[in-house]
Image: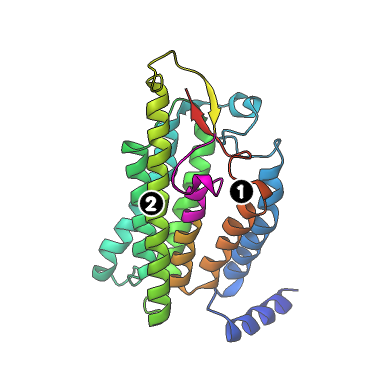
């Protein structure tokens, strides 16, 4: 069985971008394929949906869980990946044991640095998240950032560089713009609205930007930025996980139906 998997891997290597070799490479690739094939079902089912989601069942969020403020939870998720990517990008030219600096590594460091800045200065939070879930997701992002920095092609083709950078810039700018729209909505609603009346609690469909046409344009642009990273990386073990990011959200019909079920907190 192992020899068959190795022969398949060798055939893929001859026709596709490189992938991690050896037994570890096989295990990692199988795990990535499994995650891609199962993520849609897990997020569609309320019983298995990520507990930090606003759509997750309240009983799953609080049952036997140590809760922390949402801002703290988001920092736990994004900070480790941000730090390790920045450190590897800065120190790689000075230590031969570290991977060569790559465009994909720089882009992923930029992405997570942006996410940390948004958590600190853009997003408004009112709830709590389970610290165990934040640590788990933070560990996954940390390992993913390390993987990208270590395996990405330090000299991808000119076309891959240009296309990857263009998609990343469009994605990160569009994502930030729509995050600012959401933050403004929460800010205005928390002050009681234009009339200055009492606050209301609930969810409303966002308006402005591409929210009038797409239910979750901030996710759509984030997918574009990750696609840019994948193209710049020119490595199958970086490209593969992006299939999960693309297939899972766009499998939901309501993602392309504005206002159907994507909501923002309104208080």
Q: Residue at x 42, y 50 (%)?
A: 175
Q: Quadrant of the N terminus?
A: bottom right
- Secondary element at image label 1: helix
Label 2 crowd (10 A; few <14 / some 14-19 / many >=20): many
Query: Looking at the image, which is closer to me, 69 or 21?
Result: 69
Label 1 crowd (10 A; few <14 / some 14-19 / many >=20): many
- The x and y percentages for residue 215 are 56, 45
- Residue 232 shows up from this direction: yes
* Location of residue 121 with respect to 156 vertically, above or below: above
Kindly identify which residue carries mark 1. 255
* Location of residue 195 with respect to 173 vertically, above or below: above
Is 206 in the magenta?
yes
Query: Looking at the image, which is closer to me, 170 or 117?
Result: 170
Marks 1 and 2 close (CB-CB < 8 Å): no
| The residue positioned farthest toward the top in the image shown | 198
- The x and y percentages for residue 247 are 63, 58
Magenta stretch in the rendered image: 205-222
Query: Residue 154: which disc?
Result: none
Q: Residue at x 41, y 80 (%)?
A: 159
223 on left or right of 4: left
Residues at marks 1 and 2, CA–CA distance in whole angstroms? 24 Å
Q: Image quarter for residue 182? A: top left
Q: Residue at x 35, y 57 (%)?
A: 109
- Secondary element at image label 2: helix
Q: Residue at x 37, y 39 (%)?
A: 119
52 on left or right of 31: left
- The x and y percentages for residue 105 are 37, 64
Kindly identify which residue carries mark 2. 112
- Residue 80 shows up from this direction: no
- The x and y percentages for residue 53 are 57, 36
């Amino acid at each position: 069985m192992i020899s068959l998997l190795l022969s398949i891997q060798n055939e893929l290597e001859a026709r596709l971008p490189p992938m991690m070799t050896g037994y570890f490479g096989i295990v990692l690739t199988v795990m990535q394929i499994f995650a891609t094939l199962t993520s849609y079902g897990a997020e569609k089912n309320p019983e298995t949906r990520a507990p930090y989601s606003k759509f997750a069942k309240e009983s799953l969020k609080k049952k036997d869980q140590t809760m922390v403020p949402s801002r703290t939870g988001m920092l736990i998720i994004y900070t480790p990946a941000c730090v390790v990517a920045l450190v590897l990008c800065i120190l790689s030219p000075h230590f031969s044991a570290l991977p060569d600096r790559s465009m994909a590594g720089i882009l992923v460091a930029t992405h997570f640095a942006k996410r940390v800045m948004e958590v600190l200065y853009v997003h408004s939070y009112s709830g709590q998240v389970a610290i165990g879930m934040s640590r788990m997701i933070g560990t996954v992002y940390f390992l993913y950032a390390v993987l990208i920095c270590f395996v990405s092609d330090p000299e991808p083709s000119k076309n891959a560089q240009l296309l990857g950078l263009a998609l990343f810039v469009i994605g990160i700018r569009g994502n930030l713009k729509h995050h600012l729209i959401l933050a403004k909505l929460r800010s205005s609603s928390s002050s009681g609205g234009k009339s200055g009346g009492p606050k209301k609690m609930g969810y409303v469909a966002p308006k402005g930007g591409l929210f009038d046409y797409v239910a979750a344009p901030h996710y759509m642009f984030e997918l574009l930025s990750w696609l840019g990273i994948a193209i710049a990386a020119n490595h199958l073990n970086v490209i593969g996980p992006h299939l999960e990011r693309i297939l899972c959200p766009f499998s939901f019909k309501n993602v392309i139906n504005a206002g159907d079920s994507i909501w923002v907190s309104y208080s």
